[in-house]
Amino acid sequence: MSIERSRITDAAVAIFLWVVSSAILLLVVSLLFNILWHGLPHVSWSFLVDTPQEAGRSGGIGPILVSSVLILTVCVAFAVPLGVGTAAFLTEYCKFSQRTNRGIQGSLDILSGVPSIVFGLFGNIFFCKILGLGFSILSGGLTLACMVLPVIVRTSEMSLRGVSPEIRQAIESLGLSKSGALFHILLPIAVPGITAGVILSVGRSLAEAAALIFTSGYVDRMPSSLSDSGRALAIHIYDLSMNVPGGDKNAYASAVVLIALLLAMSTLTRILVRITFQRTRIC
Amino acid sequence: MSAWEHRKVFAVVHTRSRDQWLSFLLSGAALVASSFSILIFIFLLLESWPVLRATSVGSFFFDESWHPTEGLFNLVPMIAGTILVVFGAVALATPLGICLAVFQQFYAPCAMGVFMRLTMELLAGIPSVVYGLLGIVVLVPLINQLQSPGASLLAAMLTLALMILPMVVVIVEADFQKIPRPYLLGAEALGFTRWTTIKSIIFPATSGGIFAGIILQTGRAVGETMAVMMVCGNIVQVPNSLFDPMRTLSANIALEMAYATGNHRSALFLSGLILMTFVTLLVFVAGYLQRIYRRVD
């Protein structure tokens, strides 16, 4: 009797889960198709390179792509040395001082939880005002660098810790200097993992809008230097759909471009992660 | 000392000084990296100091309205809005996310499971402005047909729920995969049905981790700005119904920062400080819970 009943319950739950999951999946897939359907017809080569006209209603996203790439470059150039350096400090130099280690980890944990709008406020006051960079690509990139720093530290730390004990023993027994071991052995082994972390953070920066509104600004002209204000792709989508009546068409097209870029990056990350795992296993 | 020995000694001294330099550089990097979270707190505090001095703490709760240029700083509508939106979104996304994860892990045919996993990963990576765009173009007109104006608490809740849903699925699924295999083998040996296994083994074993994950997601949702701002209508009021437009703390900052000066600007930094404190607390609670549950396992 009880077995009979539990079989019936099982079947009922199965049906319920099938219905709920299919419904949500259908909804989600139709939303994705909605973006593609409205956006894809407007994406063309000229859309990618042209300057926006009539506040973005027509024309393309050329300068916006350039600004986005510049912001990302600044972000990476600042965050990668800092993040990898911190990770190397945590794994190679800070082994014996638990308290320092925990302090740094705790601070990075807090940083990874900070809402992006708060990063915007901080960037506005620290980079734009106090360091005097103004509304510029430089301020925006630096703000994003603070935002992605925890991601880079964590992934670099994981790949440095993933170096097999045999290699570490070999380093010890050969009596290599710390700097030599780090630059010639540990970092080269960790490179795919670190790169995966960097691409992940580039993806997050590319998707970011709230942290950039008050740091890199709104201007949709072609930036002539890093101290110019530049509009990122995500902000362009926000502006077109919120503030520009009739901008939906180009907002959709920009969204398609943004999603395509993010998709390419996540695929690259996945490939690199696979390489890292294979390599540590072989070692 | 022969020339060769001299070179050897020189090399050792040389690498030792290089090691010291590197150690110095790396500790510098670590210092800078760990100073950012403290810097953020300090600057938010410094910038919100003027308005804290100009008015009492009570005025943020008991002033007549939010008219910062006239010295009225009632933040209650924004705080209430944030809590309502986040609560609604988490209450919607959590059960649905758990359903989806259970289905994907235990019920779906292999190909469908893989398809679901890829879709959820794709969705988790979609930027919040795109969710906002979908909200404006699809959701708001739909709600507008039910009751105008469409941009409302309900729209914000649904958009945010859709946004955190894939992350909930990913978290819950990761927890499911941590279940020790002997548990599942034991359940099979006892002849449990799938649902009995899930109910009496998998849920009890993972509930702690799932709970911690949900709290972490709540923190994310509290700070979310763009998607919510694009669909919530942005009118400063405590919403009386699901169809009323409202405004959240983060949207308030994003909307008014551009032109705010003086105490108004300072009040916006104060709302940033409130957001940050709240989110940091949630992160700590989630981390603490995760540590406890890991120890129990």
Image (cartoon, coloured by chain):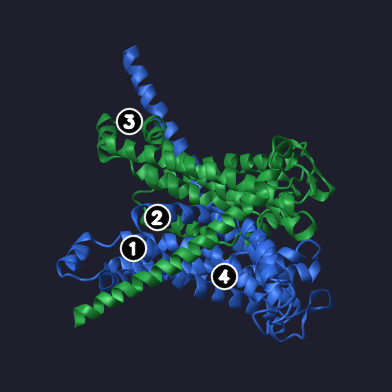
State the SS at label 3. Answer: loop
State the SS at label 2. Answer: helix
Q: Which residue is drawn at 50% across and 45% down?
A: A266
Residue bearing the label numbered 1 = B107
Q: How crowded is mark 4: few (under 14 residues within 10 Å), some or many (20 or more)?
A: some
Q: Residue at x 54, y 62 (%)?
A: A27
Residue A182: x %, y % from top left: 39, 35
State the SS at label 4. Answer: helix
Considering only order in the chain, which callout, 2 or 1, is on the residue closer to the N terminus?
A: 1
Name the side, left or right, on which B54 lies relative to A261.
right
Badge 1 and badge 4 both on one subunit: yes
Which image quadrant for residue A42? top right
Name the side, left or right, on which A258 lies relative to A281.
right
Residue bearing the label numbered 3 = A176
Cβ–Cβ below 8 Å for labels 1 and 4?
A: no
Disc 2 marks a residue whose amino acid type is Met
